[in-house]
Amino acid sequence: MDLGFADATAVVVGGGSGMGLATARCMAADGARVAVVGRTAAALDRAVAQLTELGSPDAVALAGDVGDTDAVGRIFDAVAQRWGGGLNVLINAVGPTVRGTFEELTDAQWREAVDQGAMGMVHCVRAALPLLRRAEWARIVNFSAHSTQRQTVILPAYTAAKAMVTSISKNLSLLLARDEIMVNVVSPGSIATEALRGWASTVGVDGHDPYALMSAIDEHFGHPAHLPRAGLPDEVGPVAAFLASRRNSYMTGANVNVDGGSDFT
């Protein structure tokens, strides 16, 4: 399906790996110029090589910490200088890494989760808005998490930060509707990212086996999906890419679960 990304410009924050990279790959294959943003230069360089091979005409890596407003300003200044004009797509796919029960978490860890999981998105949207408003068409897609709707005791700070993402995105969809900039949220369930596979290894499970991974999630958290396996980043990327595309012409303020099936919440 032609999603209308030919000659479009896109910034994917968290595009060096996982679901962010999967989304970037979909847009690159459809002809978008894609900038991937993250803190690890080596991962970004590998991502750019993939995007170039898929057909992105001007893929670029922009390293920086989106928790740092000065760094974010430099990133989007570089985007404006490289491509000129406006920016069509902003994807925010960065999530916090903080784990621990409510009683275990320190104040510093709560602040870290919010900074990683929500404030980085705020910084990027704020910096990108002048470029998005300048474009002929523009979309924002923010990654939340299905765990905001289905709690896990070791993720209270993570889910709180992701709930902020969902709430802020809903507000942005209202604010930016007058500019016809569509803002949507993707809420993945149990997806076999590096982080989830790493957790699986700590409980003696092969994280590369999506069926074993879902069994472990059921055993340890009691949150199985309706489907008997974990999802893959490449099953989330196309959903985010559609929401970010020109083909999405009337969908805004939505929170789309990609979770293998769950109770409606």
Image (tube, grey):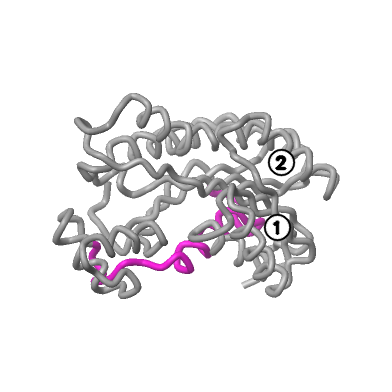
Q: Which mark is residue 227?
A: none
Tell me where residue 22 appears, x and y as whole percent: 54, 64
- Please give the name of the residue rendered at 54% of the width and 56% of the height, measured from the top-left corner: 20
Image quadrant occupied by the N terminus: bottom right
Front position in the image: 144 or 74: 74
Question: Against 29, is 251 above or below?
Answer: above
How many C-alpha atoms fall within 10 Å of the one at disc 1: few (<14), some, or many (≥20)?
Answer: many
Front position in the image: 131 or 48: 48
Q: Which residue is mark 1?
A: 34
How many C-alpha atoms fall within 10 Å of the one at disc 2: few (<14), some, or many (≥20)?
Answer: many
Question: Against 256, is 178 above or below?
Answer: above
Front position in the image: 174 or 81: 81
- Please give the name of the residue rendered at 67% of the width and 67% of the height, measured from the top-left corner: 51
Q: Secondary structure at mark 1?
A: strand
Which label lies toward us, 1 or 2?
A: 2
Type of amino acid under label 2: Ile
Residue range in magenta is 225-251
Q: Is residue 245 magenta?
A: yes
Q: Is residue 86 visible?
A: yes
Tell me where residue 254 appears, x and y as whole percent: 46, 45
Q: Is residue 173 visible?
A: no
Tell me where residue 189 appears, x and y as whole percent: 34, 56
Q: Which residue is mark 2?
A: 75
Tell me where residue 35 appears, x and y as whole percent: 70, 54
- Please give the name of the residue rendered at 67% of the width and 61% of the height, measured from the top-left corner: 45
- Which of disc 2 and disc 1 is earlier in sequence? 1
Labels 1 & 2 near each other (Cβ < 8 A): no
Indicate left or right for 254 with 207 as reference.
Answer: right
Q: Is residue 256 magenta?
A: no
Question: Against 62, is 239 above or below?
Answer: below
Instruction: Using the rendered view, name the quadrant where residue 172 is placed.
Output: top right
